[in-house]
Amino acid sequence: MPAWKAYHTPSTVDEALALLASYGGAAQIIGGGTDLLIDLQHGGQEPTRAALVDVTRIPALGEITSEGESVIVGAAVTHTAITRSALLEARATCLVESCGVVGGPQVRNVGTLGGNVAHALPAGDGTTSLVALDAEAEVAWGDGRREWLPILKLFKGPGVSALDSHRDVLVRFRFRLAGEGEGSAFRRVMRPQGVALPVLGCAIWVRLDEARATYADARICIGPVERTPALASAVQEALRGRPVGPEALEAAVAAAHASLHPRTSKYRATAEYRQHMVETLLRGALPLATRRARTGQAVAEGLGLA
């Protein structure tokens, strides 16, 4: 028996919303399908959906466009497209690095940033970087509302999204590009087991003062630690106003050990190992983001390593 009865390819967000509404909650959004199709085939979803509504043919969802000092990334933009964007590599480097390690090449070629977010997993690689970049998400709700929300508002629990994939459409993401004295980086450690499962991921954005000598601001997302993606506020506070150098790094590591407590996961690793990896990731990502902020130059690293 097929897992769905009809397959639609709308060309506008309004058309997609109308299709979803016409099925009264029995249809479902699909983007790249790299997770959904597996769920449908192996019983993670209801065995039969009335219809799938493919949003990858909607132009606005597949574009990367600049808007002043900000960039807008459509929810249906693939991970591969993100890794090939010179603008994002130079000025949102952590997002390129995180999308560059999602699955393998085949998954990255069809998997979308919106799908990474909509699945609401606290270990989502693209999600982790979007949080560090202070991104907003545009949502077209099934009741007719359309609004921009802080990215963290989309998460209710592990795998539980504020979005209803049977009624709502995740449209675009928006965030400010790195400016003078700003830089970002992403690092991940994973367990290769068919599909690489993140043990922990770490995305860091920093802004230095005019002399490039002190951390003026920082945003750090390390996950999965909490039930939903979250900023490492204590680590950020340990950096703000502190001179760049070894002491700042040690202060960040100490704050991470004191405030972040990953649990043991039979699929990922023990709590003790993951706690150690928090430090390892910080020691790799923070100096890299800082160097990029100081030099204004960034070349994404680690792309294609699944």
Image (tube, grey):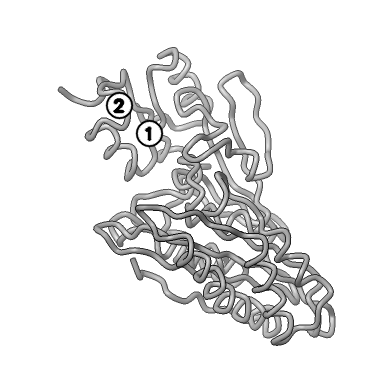
What residue sits right under mark 1 in the picture? 54
Q: Are marks 2 and 1 in contact (CB under 8 Å)?
A: yes
Amino acid at the residue labelled 2: Tyr
Helix, strand or loop at disc 2? strand
Q: Which mark is residue 229?
A: none
Q: Position of residue 259 (x, y in %)?
A: 67, 60
Q: Which residue is mark 2?
A: 7
Q: Residue furthest left?
A: 1
Q: Quadrant of residue 218?
A: bottom right
Q: Which quadrant holds residue 292?
A: bottom right
Residue 122 or 274: which is nearer the viewer? 274
Residue at point 78% right, 75% down? Answer: 215
User: Quarter-wise, where is residue 197 in the image?
Assistant: bottom left
Percent across and percent down for residue 256 are: 64, 66
Q: Is residue 80 at least partly visible in the picture?
A: no
Secondary structure, mark 1, is strand
